[in-house]
Image (spheres, rainbow, N blue to C red):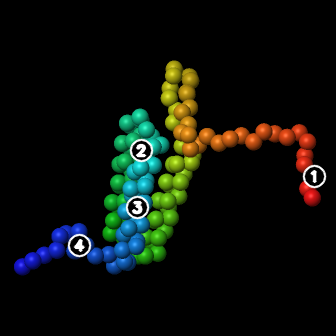
């Protein structure tokens, strides 16, 4: 008897879109983790374990509404990591050197003492 490869036999009751979205989110979270915690092996490992645990704990979820909610939460976490986390390096016991990523650095708009007139 001829059988399809395992990957072809896997069916998703919610259609391929939710499966694809979950897989994309999983990969995006791991890429973001690698960028945000670059050169910090302890943080990289802790984040890897946490991401994998969260996805494993919800692996059997079947409710489309719940899956959509979990995808939203995961996307929010990815955005938060990408936009809010800055690495710090201990230079001595009381000093921390911040190492912001280029994406986090923005141009400062100079302060203007004279307000402009609205037309």
Q: For marks 1 and 2, give the one nearer the viewer.
A: 1
Residue shown at the point (43%, 76%) measured from the top left = 64
Q: Earlier in the sequence, mark 2 or mark 3?
A: 3
Disc 4 to disc 1, how far (Cα)?
65 Å
Which residue is located at x 50 percent, y 64 percent? Answer: 72
Q: CA distance from mark 3 to mark 1?
A: 48 Å
Give the Cα distance between marks 2 and 3.
15 Å
Question: Callout 1: helix, strand or loop?
Answer: loop
Tell me which label, 3 or 1, sits earlier in the chain.
Answer: 3
- Reading the image, the residue beneath label 1 is 117
How far apart marks 1 and 2 lie (CA) works out to: 47 Å
User: Residue 107 vs residue 102: left or right?
Assistant: right
Badge 3 vs badge 1, beta-carbon distance below 8 Å: no
Q: Residue furthest front?
A: 119
- Closer to the camera, 5 or 65? 5
Of pointers 4 and 1, the one earlier in the residue sequence: 4
Q: Give residue 44's quadrant in the image.
A: top left
Q: Are marks 4 and 3 in contact (CB under 8 Å)?
A: no
Q: Which residue is mark 3?
A: 24
Q: Which mark is residue 34?
A: 2
Give the CA separation, mark 4 to mark 3.
18 Å
Helix, strand or loop for disc 2: helix
Measured Cα–Cα span from mark 2 to mark 4? 30 Å
Taking the image as drawn, is residue 86 in sight? no
In the picture, the disc for residue 8 is: 4
Q: Secondary structure beneath disc 3?
A: helix
Residue closer to the observer: 118 or 11:
118
């Amino acid at each position: 008897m001829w059988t399809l490869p395992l990957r072809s036999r896997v069916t998703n009751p919610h259609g391929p879109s939710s499966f694809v979205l979950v897989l994309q989110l999983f990969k995006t979270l791991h890429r973001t983790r690698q960028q945000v915690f670059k050169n910090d092996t302890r943080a990289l490992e802790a984040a890897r374990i946490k991401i994998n645990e969260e996805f494993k704990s919800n692996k059997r979820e079947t409710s489309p509404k719940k899956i959509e909610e979990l995808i939203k939460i995961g996307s929010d976490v990815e955005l938060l990591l990408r936009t809010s986390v800055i690495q710090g390096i201990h230079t001595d016991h009381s000093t921390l050197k911040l190492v912001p990523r280029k994406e986090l650095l923005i141009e400062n708009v100079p302060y203007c003492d004279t307000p402009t007139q609205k037309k």
